[in-house]
Amino acid sequence: MSRNAAVLADDFTFTEAPRWHDGRLWFSDFYDHAVKTITATGDVEVMVSVPGQPSGLGWLPDGRLLVVSMRDRKVMRLEPSGELVEHADLNGVAAFHCNDMVVDALGRAYVGNFGYDVHTFESDPDSGLERIAANLAFVDIDGTVSVANDDMRFANGAVIIPAHRHEAGGTAVLVVAESDAGQLSSFKIHADGSLSGRQVWAKLHGRVPDGICLDADGNIWVANAIAAECVLVAPGGELLDTVTTSAPCFACALGGDDGRTLFLATAASPLPGPAVEHRGAKIESVAVDTPTGNSP
């Protein structure tokens, strides 16, 4: 099956980390240094400024927003007063800019980082930079930081598949998009948040997985960072559905009143110069058959 997305709103620099929360879509606009929201009718509002450049989003059990501050390698927390404060410092584990994040029901976060200067790598073939493995960070509810896995090939979007979706006695599973490996990788999540049992959840042949989201059937929508598409993938890698977008797709989220709207973050380029100059990033949307699986 294949379907086309429609533009819901545009005039952004680079849209990333969409999350449906409290009746609207939240997302980061990188080079506007802002977390924004958009309603189903396209009304946009700036929620908080993040000078260090926002990316991954999530919420604590008490409703406070967590947001990755990329360039200073921190997770920030938005207090009820409107003050943005440091929640966790990832400089000890992140080799370069921090990126996407998933937050579990207990308020614990898994945060990826580039591992290397990807923008220089892509724009300057003679830079001498290499694609290297990077740490996946675990941020406990109190802000304590540790390494969840030390061999991630550009950890990007992530979802948590709840334990109840597995066999009796099963555990929750973390699935992470490894952009440089062209695959989704899975881990068992233990009670203390630690990970084990790494497996390839799906190979994405010829695609670069970026943001991902889970549907109620346990399949995963995958934004393809090198093509104008978002694909629905089953465990093992079977391609179930394709959405065509107007530009390369960097992230996705299921939401809307019935959970059956797939929101898509698209842009012609993630590079700061073109992104700021052209402001061509968009939020697009399309109706799909299966609702959200209640994980980003």
Image (spheres, rainbow, N blue to C red):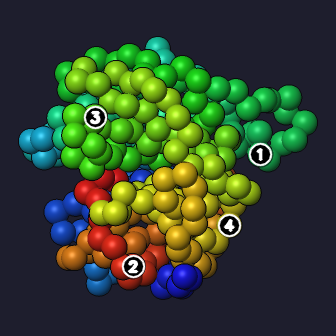
Residue at 12% across / 41% down in the picture?
A: 61
Q: Is residue 279 visible?
A: no
* Residue at mark 3: 171
Q: Amino acid at mark 2?
A: Val
Q: What numbered label is drawn on residue 227?
A: 4
Q: Residue furthest front?
A: 168
Q: Residues within 10 Å of mark 3 (few under 14, many from 20)?
A: some
Camera-near label (1 vs 2) is 2
Q: CA distance from mark 1 to mark 2?
A: 33 Å
Camera-near label (1 vs 3) is 3
Up-down relation of residue 263 to residue 155 (above or below) = below
Q: Position of residue 126 (x, y in %)?
A: 90, 36
Q: Nearer the viewer, residue 79 or 59?
A: 59
The quadrant of the image that shows the N terminus is bottom right
Q: Amino acid at mark 1?
A: Glu
Give whichever of discs 4 and 2 has the lower sequence position: 4
Residue 66 found in image quarter: top left
Give whichever of discs 1 and 3 has the lower sequence position: 1
Camera-near label (2 vs 3) is 3
* Residue at mark 2: 288
Q: Position of residue 75 (x, y in %)?
A: 34, 32
Up-down relation of residue 200 to residue 21 (above or below) = above
Q: Residues within 10 Å of mark 1 (few under 14, many from 20)?
A: few
